[in-house]
Image (tube, rainbow, N blue to C red):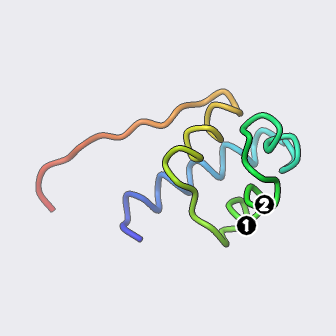
């Protein structure tokens, strides 16, 4: 996984964990299966962009991507 994607995922997981919400509550808020939410939070699965956005919104956040030129 690219460094930027890893950073986005790490920040997302940190925000979700900081919310203190269980995977079942997050599942209810997002429509994502609770087992999938748990896998994402453990690092055993990478969420789709759609699911990442749902998780961010569930904890009061948002996803922001910035295009950068160069390597």
Q: Which mark is residue 12?
A: none
Indicate the position of residue 34 as horizontal and vertical percent values. Answer: 82, 54
In the rendered view, would you say 46 is above or below 23?
A: below
Would you name the residue on which mark 2 appears? 38
Q: Tell which residue pokes out farthest to the left in this image.
A: 70
Q: Nearer the viewer, residue 12 or 31?
A: 31
Front: mark 1 or 2: 2
Q: Which residue is mark 1?
A: 42
Is residue 60 positioned above or below 23 on the image? Answer: above
- Where is the C terminus found, in terms of image quarters? bottom left
Q: Secondary structure at mark 2?
A: helix
Instruction: Report the label total.
Output: 2
Tag 1 and tag 2, C-beta contact below 8 Å = yes
Of 7 and 34, nearer the camera is: 34
Kindly report the distance in space between the C-alpha atoms of the residues bearing marks 1 and 2.
6 Å
| Residue at (47% x, 62% y) in the render | 6
Is residue 22 shown left or right of residue 43? Answer: right
Horizontal placement of 38 versus 57: left or right? right
* Residue located 49% across and 48% down the image: 49
Secondary structure of the residue carrying tag 1 is helix
User: Residue at 72% across / 47% down in the picture?
Assistant: 32
Q: Residue at x 66, y 50 (%)?
A: 14
Residue 8, percent from left and from top:
48, 51
Q: Residues within 10 Å of mark 2 (few under 14, many from 20)?
A: some
Quadrant of the rendering where the N terminus is positioned: bottom left
């Amino acid at each position: 996984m690219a460094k930027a994607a890893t950073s986005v995922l790490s920040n997302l997981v940190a925000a979700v964990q900081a919310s203190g919400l269980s995977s079942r509550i997050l599942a209810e808020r997002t429509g994502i299966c609770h087992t999938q939410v748990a896998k994402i939070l453990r690092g055993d699965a990478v969420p789709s962009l759609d699911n990442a956005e749902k998780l961010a919104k569930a904890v009061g956040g948002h996803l922001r991507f910035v295009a950068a030129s160069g390597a």
